[in-house]
Image (cartoon, rainbow, N blue to C red):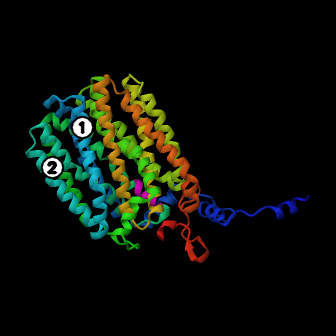
Amino acid sequence: MSALNRHSEAKPKPLSLQLHKEAAFPRWKLGQNLLPSWSERAKQFAQAGHLPTLLSAFFYFDVCFAIWVLNGAMAPFISEEFHLTPAQKGLMVSVPILSGALMRFPLGVLAEYIGRKSAAMVEMSMITIALLYGWLFVNTYQEVLTMGILLGIAGASFGVALSLGSGWYPAEYKGLAMGIAGAGNSGTVLATFFGPPLAQKYGWGSVYGIAILPMLIAMAALFFLAKEPPNPHEKKLKDYMKVLVEKDAWIMNLTYIVTFGGFIGLSNFMPTFFHDQFGISKIKAGQFTTLVVLMGSAARVVGGYLADRLGGIKILKGVLILVFTGVILASQATNLYLMTAILLLIFAGLGAGNGSVFQLVPLRFPYATAVASSLIGEIGALGGAIIPNAMGLSKQWMGNFVFGFVSFGAIVSFAFLAIYKSERQWILNWVGEGGKALREDLAIPHGRVVMVPVMEIW
């Protein structure tokens, strides 16, 4: 049989696969570069949305994140003053995480009704009051826990900040925009680097009063620079609530328990871990924590960018393997510098994974990105509350932190299996090969745009 006949008898590929392949990998004219250069892409990105809103959302999230993790940065000082057990240390660090997680979804719903910018301003006003309480009225361990509940308000900023910052950007730039806004988790660096020296000089209680100043600056920046993004998908409350029962949302929840829960849980506990495990000073413990957290924050932007280019699913599978390998190695490491190197790899994976998850969220839930982001962020942060308690109990019961690391590794393996089993269905229904955004101009019969998820019609 001739090559021509063989070609003519070949079975055509299904239309849905052809559309998804073309959407994820558009054809370019002969002689053109397949991908634009970094400078061209940066220029396109700057022109695609509203950069002042994105940057002010980043600053808002950065300051809120610093305040959210402030108890973790102050933990060695507070533990010394109140003579806390390892389990009490874990509980103290986890309370703001848990509180912030529970507040995220309600704030996301509020943002859909009064606007993301207005919701952020309300939140920052409440955080200022919480900082005043921490500065002036905390004198016992029980009051530290109460302060932790109030400071959790700062942890609710996540979904609103990402939705506000990326709201002006089209689908092909969502991952990068959300990665930039989400890099506000670098606020941990502000807390761990500046907090311990200030506590050493002025007392740990005064640090909460000092933190009011950057919060007021962030409020002013958001008020004057941010512009409320359009919301083309007008929905009722019951439509937003349907996100709660979506299978895809809960798979992303599980994945985010690993990537963000791991990041916030470990970064909060790291000052205590470095201080207790290796006997270094409180300030040096903060400096080592700053180093590994910086890696995670920088990797978040890279993760969002790579997810746009290569696909969020593909990046997630890779980083989950990296994180699993890292936590198993960390459970056995006994040298300070070897442990730091392993933690740098773990935090790089967690950061890149954070960016990758939120490249997928607006593609799957374009009609309720703020609500979906808040839900996924809430569940992820709830997972983060597990880690400090697991680490504290492991130290108290076993005399080491092995159980804490191994239990986290088990959660990582479950998340990988969930993504692996869902990949094929996601690609067939709402996303391109590897998790890339589908082209908006590519439609299937009856005029429906492929990139809009099937669940848009309930």
Mark 2 → mark 1, Cα distance in angstroms: 20 Å
In the visual, does 31 lie left or right of 355?
Answer: right
Query: Is residue 201 shown above or below 146?
Result: above
Q: Quadrant of residue 52?
A: bottom left
Residue toward you, 126 or 403 = 403
Instruction: For mark 2, give the secondary structure.
Output: helix
- What's the residue type where badge 2 is placed? Leu
- What's the residue type where badge 1 is placed? Leu
In the visual, does 309 lie left or right of 17?
Answer: left
Q: Is residue 407 visible?
A: yes
Q: Residues within 10 Å of mark 1 (few under 14, many from 20)?
A: many
Question: Which mark identifies residue 131?
Answer: 2
In the visual, does 286 lie left or right of 253?
Answer: left
Question: Is 310 covered by the magenta stretch?
Answer: no
Q: Position of residue 35 (x, y in %)?
A: 59, 57
Q: Position of residue 181 (x, y in %)?
A: 36, 56
Q: Quadrant of the N terminus?
A: bottom right
Q: Position of residue 401 (x, y in %)?
A: 34, 27
Give the overall secondary structure of the magenta segment.
Answer: helix
What is the span of residues highlighted in magenta in the rendered image? 173-179
Residue toward you, 403 or 140 = 403
Instruction: For mark 1, give the secondary structure.
Output: helix
Residue under the image location 40 percent in, 34 percent down? 407
Q: CB atoms at circles 2 and 1 under 8 Å apart?
A: no
Q: Position of residue 19 (x, y in %)?
A: 63, 65
Q: Is residue 116 visible?
A: no
Residue under the image location 28 percent in, 31 percent down? 392
Residue toward you, 428 or 340 = 428
In the visual, does 367 lie left or right of 269?
Answer: right
Question: Which mark identifies residue 91?
Answer: 1
